[in-house]
Amino acid sequence: MNTAPGEKIPAGGAGICTFDSIQQGETNYHSAYVSPGSSTLFVNLNWFVPQQSLTLKIISPSGSTYAYYHDTDLDGDKDAKIRTWIPSPEAGTWRFQVYGETVRGTQDYTFEGTAG
């Protein structure tokens, strides 16, 4: 599995867990390999400061956009996190794009994409 600088492979080897930073208008790219037969892909983006806004685009191994999320899309709260589960994910490399939608200075964040 290929990882970007700072990315770590979680126990079991199916996914990534990374600490990164982003600025206004910047896009960071992450990826995670999902093995055939995985039941769930857990995706978690946390940036800790609700006044800042990041978005997350999830792209399946076949290249189609699975989802595009803003902070409030999943739980209705502006809580500086996007957390979702993808049931019966397609096997292969999933790609994730984190975008700095409204960021003052530099915003740190954690990103996790793990399959099980």
Image: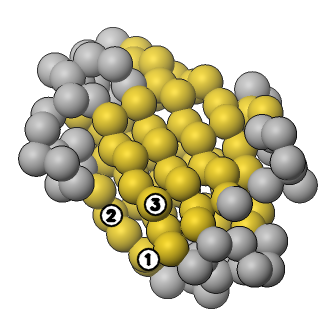
Q: Secondary structure at mark 2?
A: strand
| Distance CA(mark 3)–CA(mark 1) | 15 Å
Q: Which mark, residue 68? A: 2
Pointer 1 residue: 65
Describe residue 56's horizontal placement relative to residue 69 as left or right.
right
Q: Residues within 10 Å of mark 1 (few under 14, many from 20)?
A: few
Residue 25 appears in the picture as rendered: no
The N terminus: image quadrant: bottom right
Q: Residue at x 64, y 82 (%)?
A: 90
Cα distance, mark 2 to mark 1? 7 Å
Residue that mark 3 sits on: 85
Q: Earlier in the sequence, mark 3 or mark 2?
A: 2
Q: Who's the residue at 18% across and 48% down the image?
A: 75
Q: Name the kind of residue labelled 2 in the image.
A: Tyr
Instruction: State if disc 1 and disc 2 touch (CB < 8 Å).
Output: yes
Residue 54 place in picture, x, y as percent: 31, 38
Q: Is residue 13 left or right of residue 17?
A: right
Numbered disc 1: secondary structure: strand
Left or right of 39, for residue 15: right
Where 66 sits versus 108, above or below? below
Disc 3 marks a residue whose amino acid type is: Trp
Q: Quadrant of residue 115?
A: bottom right
Image spot of residue 72 (x, y percent): 15, 46
Mark 3 to mark 2: distance in Å? 14 Å
